[in-house]
Amino acid sequence: MKASLGIDLGTSGVKAVVADERLRPLAEAERHYPVSSPQPGWAESDPLVWLSAAQEAASEALDGAGQVEIAGVGIDGQLHGGLLLDARGLPIRPAILWPDTRAEAVLAPWRELPEEDLAKLANPITPGMLGPICAWVRQHEPQAFAKVAQVASAKDWLRAQLLGQADQVTDPTDASATLLWDVHADGWHSAALELAGLRPDQLGALASPGSVAGHTGRAAGAFGLPDGIPVATGCGDVAAAAYGMGLSAGQRMVSLGTGHQVVATAEHLSSAWPPAFHAYRGVDPFGLHMAAPLNGGYALNLARGELGATWEELYAAADYVPGPTTPIFMPYYAPERFGPGVSKSKGWHAAKQVGGWDPALSDSPPDRPLAELLYAVLEGVCCNLAMAARDLPGPAPEVLYAVGGGAREAGYRQLLADAFGAAIQTAPAVSWSALGAARLGFAAAGLAATAELSGGQTTAPGENAGLQERFAAFRQLAGRRP
């Protein structure tokens, strides 16, 4: 049996899957790693920890797949953020990740670009993208920046380690998520590069996601791979999930991982300015419009920790029925990317009565039962995601395909379905980004692979008038129209 290895390098963990030509998982493995925050608002990772975790997960998945012929390998990874590398391709400092907000202080030159240039970047000006990150390091860590020979996305660096290469190669899906890329001309944006202090040659050669970046050799032994296997260039994790699922134009996917996103496929990318959503290149033939609030699974984890609750307790609280004194939680641990006037503060709004909310914001949770507070946390994140998705162009579909760890939780899916007013359908596999990477591995081997989306669970929206009333209050508190 021919199979492909897909590796999904996420923010807080790496997944590896061995899949057949119908993208059915034959074996899977996962490893987790921490995200460090040495200062408030910072989010960093050690890339060498990524490498070790990916090697372990890939080796375990390959061992579990048994007697199969690995035809190809594909890798996808977290968008935004990035690594600064020396001439040997080694990290100069820890990777700076997409939730990181330190570069907020250097965004003014980006925002002052002519509107024509901003429309070409086609994305909100946010601090967690590679361009502003490089500008911050250039200004605040000049000795480190002087050593920079190349910069790379997470998946591109990992693929280079697999292939034993020093030179970086990237693809349009990752490039379009850097604030350095002209999304409509498909090339680097010269004015943005100047702001970041970078040259085009430092960003790596461009290749399509399914093209062959190289073949496995000695370095791949640590991943459990033999020599001579073609390795695809790969793509960003959102594009990989959409590609793995085989979404067609107009369909939408909701991803429920460390980041929460709603992704809509599009035949033509929007150039509206100011943008209320991201516009990225996808794996051909579609582009991707993405509502990507920063405060998704990242906010759930922080709030859960503050309340001293387990993940099991958090998701169990989705079944709690809120009353007239149940607080509304604003999950803004990080400033949001979308929409003018959105609240920048995390905190609790106490209810006076249904429909009437105390405008006072408190960082400390009120004296309420734990299950009620945890419900408010889940509700706040769901409302924030549904609010962001309202800005996506095109009609809202009746069904959204759900992927990621949060999609496993029935109560959370119901809360999302009620907030969106649309059915949430799980695809038969959770790790669709890893399966999309596996599909790219087949493409690099010259083989076609297709997925089956049937077989998942569908959660229909209920008549939840109480949630809609609370959602309207949430939008008002967040500075958006009900």
Image: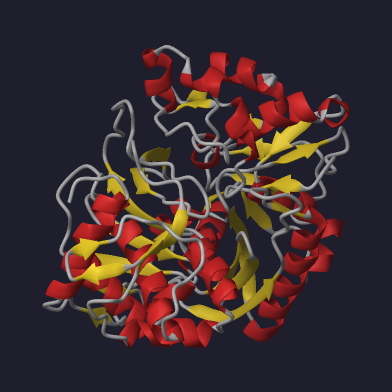
Say which of 252 and 104 sits in front: 104
- In the image, residue 42 lies at what x, y percent? 67, 48
The residue shown at (73%, 58%) is 36
Q: In this view, does 120 lie above or below 441?
A: above
The residue shown at (17%, 51%) is 482
Specify the quadrant of the image occupied by residue 463.
bottom left
- In the image, residue 461 lies at what x, y percent? 17, 75
Whether residue 174 sits left or right of residue 38 in the image: it is: left
Screen quadrant of the N terminus: bottom right
- In the image, residue 372 lies at what x, y percent? 38, 82
Q: In this view, does 238 lie above or below 327?
A: above
Image mark count = 0
Residue 261 makes an appearance in the image: yes
The residue shown at (33%, 39%) is 339
The residue shown at (27%, 34%) is 268
- In the image, residue 409 lies at what x, y percent? 40, 82
Q: Is residue 336 above or below residue 110?
A: below
Specify the quadrant of the image occupied by residue 427.
bottom left
Say which of 264 and 187 sits in front: 264
Specify the quadrant of the image occupied by residue 217.
bottom right
Say which of 280 and 110 sits in front: 110
Residue 423 makes an appearance in the image: no
